[in-house]
Image: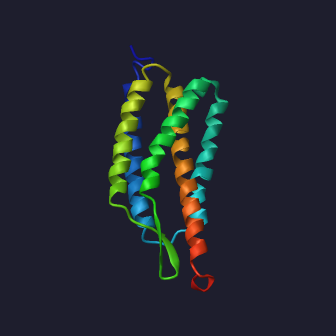
Amino acid sequence: MSVNAGIPNIQFISTIVAVCMALLVIVVRMKASKKPTSLTKILMPPIGMSTGFFMFLAPETRLPWLYVFIAVVVGGIFSLPLIATSKFEYLNGNIYLKRSKGFPLILLFLLALRIGLHNYVEQYISLPQTGGAFFILAFAMIVPWRYVMYVRYRALLQQVPKTML
């Protein structure tokens, strides 16, 4: 029996919120590819997201270290397709994120996988711990992805003649 039996509305609502967030990310990413990017735009999402670690001040969200390790490893694995589809190009004096046709499909696949994992994991740990575990997974996914974007952006910036910027 589920640890969270009797709370189906929270499960349904959290799934709907996750789907909406994924769709929002797809829309934002598609719009972002039409505008020049910058180091600030690359680095701010993980910095802003890092405030979520304050949730672990509440004892009910804390996890065993093994679960933290597993969430970090899975997040790192989930970052690989995002890294593979994030490339930059220099156009008209600016650096843009190249639009990838596979990116929306990858995000939807990762969302479906995440929902399946979430439903499995919440059978064994409390809902607050499940939220904490999936926050760690998401953070461990975004940090390597944004780090690689940062490195690629800097490399492209070094290749562009200074008079062109």
- 1 left or right of 142 in image: left
Q: At 40% across and 48% down in the image, what residue appears?
A: 22
Q: Residue furthest top?
A: 1
Q: Position of residue 143 (x, y in %)?
A: 57, 48
Tell me the quadrant of the picture where the N terminus can be found: top left
Q: Is residue 77 visible from the viewing direction of this image?
A: yes
- Front residue (pair 46, 17): 46
State the residue in front, 25 or 83.
Answer: 83
Q: Nearer the viewer, residue 25 or 87?
A: 87
- Residue extending furthest toward the bottom: 163
The mark tally for this picture is 0
- Percent coordinates x, y for residue 3 in the rendering: 45, 17
Q: Which quarter of the image is occupied by the C terminus?
A: bottom right
Query: Residue at position x 36%, y 49% from top?
Result: 106
Q: Is residue 65 above or below residue 149?
A: above
Which quadrant holds residue 109?
top left
Foreground pick, 16 / 42? 42
Q: Is residue 10 visible?
A: no
Q: Is residue 73 left or right of residue 100?
A: right
Return the x and y of residue 57 as percentages of the image width and height.
Answer: 67, 31
| Residue at the outermost front position | 159
The residue at 52%/77% (across/down) is 94
**In the figure, 41 relative to 74: above or below?**
below
Q: Classify residue 150 by image quadrant.
A: bottom right
Q: Where residue 120 appears, x then y in whole percent?
A: 39, 25
The color scheme shown is rainbow
The image shows residue 30, relative to residue 76, as above or below, that is below
